[in-house]
Amino acid sequence: MTEVKVPFIDLRQRFEEEKTELLACVERVLSLGHFVLTQEVDEFERQAAAYAGAKHCIGLNSGTDALMIALWTLGIGRGDEVITTPVSFVATTGSIVHVGATPVYADIGDDMNIAPEQIERRITPRTKAIMPVHWSGRIADMDAILDIARRHNLIVIEDAAQTMGARYKGRHGGTFGAAGAFSAHPLKNLNALGDGGFLMTDDDEIARKARLYRTHGLQDRDNCVLYGVNSRLDSLNAEVLKFRLERLDGVLARRRRNVELYRSLIKSGPVRIFEDKPHEQNAHVMFLVQAENRDGLKQHLAAHGIESLVYYGRALHLHKAAEKLGYKAGDFPVAEAHCDRVLALPHHQHLSEEQIAYVAETVNRFYGV
Ligand SMILES: *Cc1c(COP(=O)(O)O)cnc(C)c1O
């Protein structure tokens, strides 16, 4: 086996860097002896809401739960259609299916995000909401999407799982629509020690309901006012997220530096690197490129000790679970072409400049450029 010289991600390095502070978080929370919906959760919620410029943040168990709870609070369910993108993690579609609604796909544009003009073509009398995804940390074209939503009286729920730290015309992602669903999974920019998530909203009623849904619909110990689930952000994770939120801008700066280096070193042509538009601040959760002979490049990188991942090689409408939805290959040509070419190169805040230069050189050598 080839020695790994550039791992895709290295969570142990992250632990080494944060060890003292993380262990102090564990000690603080354990010594207090309360673990459910404590002050740590309130504090994280307040700080995260302030960071994003939202009125409310509700700490939850995962980004997937945040999506489902957002849909529940907005009364979206059986008989309703939600327009979403075929290029995302499966949970985007899964959340729509789980509340009983029907996902309707609209093809992506050349920024990997849902294309506004495709959304308009998919609107029917049953359409209730649009669920854009800010894929890899790049905000979808929210001006156009909000305009469509206004004209057709549709709700916007943002899948903001990869959005912490991402802005569009100065405004933080996940705060454009009625609600934004964030993930704190270890692979996201602001991450917990395992699963975690949160929902952001400016709407008092959505916030009130989300707080009920996350804890069995219990208004207090003796009064259940609706049937909810158990989806509370753990106090330990809240404490860790508070600490990591303070460092988030530093993490973002390091990730931006990686991408700028990659951009300057990889010769374009056979590899397409997505440019950032002037009005966007990309959170760079993943560094995705589109590559000619993608599978050949991936193999070549592996032979040189560089881990890369196809993120993802299948558009959502072509999964077995989507059979019932009735789509077929060819329905979303831009999304499908993207999935055939996309590759995620190693990208995390602990990569050294030498490692990035080595990856770029190995890519260039593969294409002989
Ligand atoms: C990670 C992710 C999710 C799911 O978040 P979890 O916290 O893992 O449940 C949903 N949508 C997108 C776009 C994601 O990247």
Image (cartoon, rainbow, N blue to C red):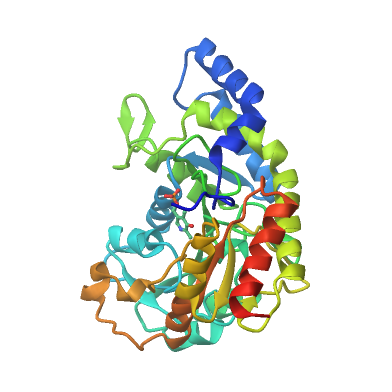
Q: Is residue 168 left or right of residue 218?
A: right
- In the image, residue 285 sits, relative to residue 268, either above or below, namely above
- In the image, residue 219 sits, relative to residue 206, either above or below, namely above
Residue at image point 27% right, 71% down:
322
In terms of depth relative to the viewer, which is nearer, 248 or 287?
Answer: 287
Q: Residue furthest front?
A: 1
Percent x, y of residue 151: 55, 81
Q: Quadrant of the C terminus?
A: bottom right
Q: Is residue 244 left or right of residue 263?
A: left
Hey, which quadrant is residue 136 in on the image? bottom right
Percent x, y of residue 213: 38, 42
- In the image, residue 210 sits, relative to residue 364, either above or below, namely above
Q: Quadrant of ligand 1?
A: bottom left
Q: Is residue 142 in view from this perspective?
A: no
In terms of depth relative to the viewer, which is nearer, 180 or 343?
Answer: 343
Q: Is residue 27 left or right of residue 225?
A: right
Percent x, y of residue 241: 59, 35
Hey, which quadrant is residue 97 in on the image? bottom left
Percent x, y of residue 334: 48, 85
Q: Is residue 259 left or right of residue 134?
A: right
Residue at image point 54% right, 20% down:
26
Q: Is residue 235 in view from this perspective?
A: yes
Residue at image point 56% right, 43% down:
10
- In the image, residue 343 sits, relative to residue 32, either above or below, namely below
Q: How many marks?
A: 0
In terms of depth relative to the viewer, which is nearer, 47 or 89?
Answer: 89
